[in-house]
Image (cartoon, rainbow, N blue to C red):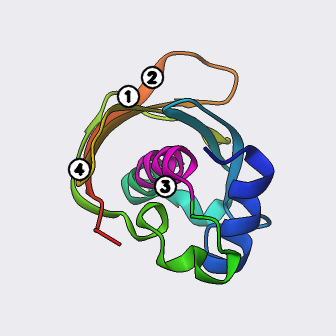
Amino acid sequence: MLDLAQVNSFLAVHFPQIGPGRDFIVESVGPMSARLRLVYRDEHLRPGGTISGPSMFALADVAIYVAILAQIGVGDDPSKAHLSAGSLAVTTNLNINFLRKPEPRDLIGEAKLMKLGKRLAVGEAWLHSEGDDAPVAHAVATYSIPPV
């Protein structure tokens, strides 16, 4: 399993669009779990002043991906980390239920893996506005884990 520093290092090198300094912050990883933050920016708002559905969808997808990545790891050879099963996991399905209007502030995504097999992973993510534990969205996703 990867720790928080290893996950952030991998993302910075191999997935810079979601790595440190971008919209997503990986706050913690643990056994079969991850917690991410979507940093509030005006670009995430939709008309009406609420965080947009695509921004919430992205947070859920990235949070579950990070939970998989942290759990599977990236192998022992840093030069081939981008070719590991964990790094190459891809979303095959993601269903999201938008439960209520999120406030225009940071969103927190709490992801938990429900199943982690050799070829498939299934996880869920609960999203809530910072400072408010009431969920604004719930997502369930399946990822394909390629053989390497």
Separation of residues labelled 4 and 3 (CA atoms): 16 Å
Q: Measuring from the top left, give residue 113's x and y in whole percent.
A: 39, 33
Which of label 1 and label 4 is nearer to you? 4
Tell me what residue is drawn at x 45 percent, y 48 percent.
68
Q: Are marks 2 and 1 in contact (CB under 8 Å)?
A: yes
Dot 4 or dot 2, earlier in sequence: 4
For the stretch drawn in magenta, the main secondary structure is helix
Q: CA distance from mark 3 to mark 2?
A: 17 Å
Screen quadrant of the N terminus: top right
Q: Which residues are magenta?
A: 60-73
Q: Residues within 10 Å of mark 4 (few under 14, many from 20)?
A: some
Residue labelled with disc 1: 100
* Amino acid at pointer 4: Leu
Residue 143 lies, with reference to residue 33, above or below; the image says below
CB under 8 Å between discs 3 and 2: no
Front position in the image: 28 or 81? 81
Q: Nearer the viewer, mark 4 or mark 3?
A: 4
Secondary structure of residue under mark 4: strand
**Which of marks 2 and 3 precedes in the sequence?**
3
Kind of residue indicated by mark 2: Pro
Mark 3 or 1, nearer chain start: 3
